Each structure stands twice: as structure tokens, then as C-alpha cells.
Amino acid sequence: MDQGAASGGAAAPTRTRRRSLLGRIVGTLLTLLVLAGVAGGAWYLTQRNASEPRPGVGGPGGPGGGTGGFRRVATTVGVAPATRADIPVIIDALGTVTPAATVTVRPQVSGVISEIRFREGETVAKDQVLVILDPRPFQLALDVAQGNLARDEAQLQNAQVTYERYRTLLTQNSIARQEVDTQAATVKQLQGVIAADRAAVDTARLNLAYSRITAPIGGRVGLRPIDVGNYVSTGDAAGVAVINQVVPIDVLFSVPEDDVPRIEARMSKATPPDVTAYDRTRTTALGQGKFQTLDNLIDTTTGTVKAKARFGNEAGSLFPGQFVNVRMQLDMISNAIVVPVAGVRHGTDGDFAYVVGEDSTVKVRKVRRGPAAGDMVSIVEGLAEGERVVTEGGDRLVDGQQVQLPGQAPPQRPQGQGQGQGGQRRQQRPGGGAASTP
């Protein structure tokens, strides 16, 4: 009895665990069955919707289908007419303002700065005195050179008098010819010394003039790298001042290599094209200039060519190193057919547009676009004046689809719409199917 009771007590927990495991298995199977049912129902609904004729897509009665189907629902679109207008041929680019000339003013002689006659950032004129070096050493050198010249000129004068006396004595056979020739050589020697002395005087006078350092060009002076009392020499890399010519001033920019032929053709005319510089936001015009020239080499890494335009910059609105947006007008196309940029689309076969007919159906029309200006683009081929093109809602359109314009009533279904073959009319069943009735 004790052993049986023990064995019965041990088997009870085992049966309990088995029933629990069986319950979990049954619950898992039921969950899987429910999920399979949901998936099957979704698959059925999807296949049924796919098999039913959709409006205008392969169904009978729609575009490209047979009779007895549904018509495609009209899509509301925005349209714009093709008009005629004068449109400029414009090239937009990014540019950098550069001075027309940049000069680092360096001293021609070495010396100590005794006076500075310019202020940092001011505009100086050509030949204006900027810095004065201590002139005393150069004045003394000039005095020495002039003294040597005066001494040698006196010696030359004495030698010439002696030479003339020797020539008179030679005619009287009172002196040897050798002494006359020697004296003639002495005169020539002293003449050479005089020439060297005069050059030394000119050099000393030039060095004295170089002690007054002047501006070689007019322009804006930068920050001052020197002070009074500094010793400067001809080998100083920083110099005494840097001058940038800002009136006029240049703008360097790059244009695509495809535009080079048009620019060259425009440059062959008498008047160069106009160039306008705008700020970073393209809202404020900083200056009006003229196109100057193209570089002689295409950058193979970017496919662009450097170009330069010159601006008067009388107002000083352009500053060296400034980033600007450049707009150059090459030409003006008169009486061109133009449409909004949104009306021209690009596909695998090139540019096209959706043209709305009188019956409110759209047709795909291949077009060839021309230059654009702002939000308008010119059409070289493919559109006529007055034709309406779709500008909004074109992503949902197909060729031949009927559309609805803003403010227009929906199109009415014509009589007999929905008649199928054999005189049968398709009716919608409550369950979603279709039944044929005579």
C-alpha cells in the first residue's frame, strides 16, 4: 500500500506537466491556424481586386480595353498655356572678386624708416608718397659723388690744356711725338673717369629719390607691416605696403565648356555681353560689368573654362576675395514660345509634355527645350502657341487619360456607358462581384 501510494503520488505531477505541454501545443496550433486564415483572406482579397477591371487599366471600356468596363476617374490637374515672349539667354555661375592689380611695395634701397604717410585701409593715388627713409646717408653719398666729379673734371681740363701745348711744340719740332701721344691718352683716360663720376652722381641722386617710397598704382592699402624706426631692405618679402586696385575690379568665374561656342560667337560682336554680380542670396545686385575674356585651357577635371569680367566698382560694393553669383546675358530670343518649367518633363525618350486637348484628354507630346530664364523655359520644337500643358498633377497621368481642370465640373458619363458585349449590362453585386443581366 505504501509503495502504490508513493507511485501514484509521483505519477500525478507527471500527468499535470503533460496536460500543460499539450495545452501549449494546442494553443500554438490554433494561433497558427488563425494567422494562416488572416493571410489567406488578405491574399484572396488582393487577388480579387487585381482580377477586377480597374478604371481605364486593361478593363473593358477603359483606355486600351474592350467594352463594358469602367472609365478612369478624371484627375484634377493644373495647366498653363504656351505663350510667346522675349526670353534672354543667360549663363549663371559662381565667381570670386579679384583686384585688377595687386602690388607689394618694396623699398629700392635699404634704410631706416623716418616717416609713414599712409593709413591702413585708405585709398591712395598713384605716385603718392607712402614711406620716407632717412635721407641723410643718401644725401652724403650724392655729395661725395659730386665732389669726385668736380675733381676729375678739373684734372681733365688741365690735361686738355697740356695736350694742346704739346701739339704746338710738336709742330715746332720742340718735343718728342711720344710725349704728345702719352698726353692724348691721359686726356681720354680722364674723360672715362668723368663718365663714371657722372654715373655715380646719377646713382646717388636716384638712391636719394628712392628714399621716398611712392605708390606704383592707385588702390586700397592693406594692413601696415612696418613702423617708424624699422630698418627695411630690398630683400624684405613683406615690403612696406600691399595695394589692391579695386576701381576697376575683376570677377573670375567658370563656365561650362558647352557654352564656350556661344560665348565665342557673342564675343565676335562689337559689344561685349553684360555681366551682373549678385550677393550670396541672389537678391541684391552688387554691380554691372562687361565680359572680358576666356582662359585658353579647359579644366579636364571639371569640364569648365575660367572667365573674367570687369566692373567699374565706383560705389565700392565689390570687395577683393568676395564670393558672388554671376549672371551673364549672351543674347535675347525674341517672340519665343515659352511655358513654365514645371510643364516640361524628362523621360527615357527625352523631354516631353502633357498637352490637354479640347475634350479634356491629355496627349504625350515630345518637345525640344531651349534656353530658360527664371521659371519659364523656351520650346524650340513640339508646341504651338495657345496649347495647354500640364504643370501640376502630371505624375498620375497616362496618355489619353481624361483630366479635370480647376473649377471645371466633373465629366458626365455618356449614354450607354457600361454596356458590354451582347447587349448585357454589368451590375455590381453586394458581395463585390459582377452579374450580367439582359
Image (cartoon, rainbow, N blue to C red):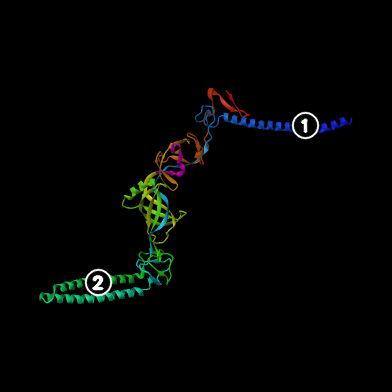
Q: Does the magenta stretch include residue 338?
A: yes
Chain-order first, disc 2 or disc 1: 1
- For label 1, the residue is 18
Report the front residue among 168 and 233.
168
Circles 2 and 1: CB atoms closer than 8 Å: no
Spatial separation of the CA atoms under disc 2 and disc 1: 133 Å
Position above or below: 289 against 193: above
- The residue segment tinted magenta is 337-350
Q: Which amino acid does label 1 sit on?
A: Arg
Position above or below: 302 against 24: below
Residue 179, image x, y percentages = 16, 74
- For label 2, the residue is 193
Which marked residue is nearer to the observer: mark 2 or mark 1?
A: 2
Indicate the secondary structure of the residue bearing disc 2: helix
Residue 339, image x, y percentages = 43, 43
Report the front residue among 159 and 421.
159
Report the front residue among 7 and 15.
7
Q: Does the magenta stretch include residue 259?
A: no
The answer to whether 22 appears left or right of 305 in the picture is: right
Indicate the secondary structure of the residue bearing disc 1: helix
Which image quarter: residue 277? bottom left
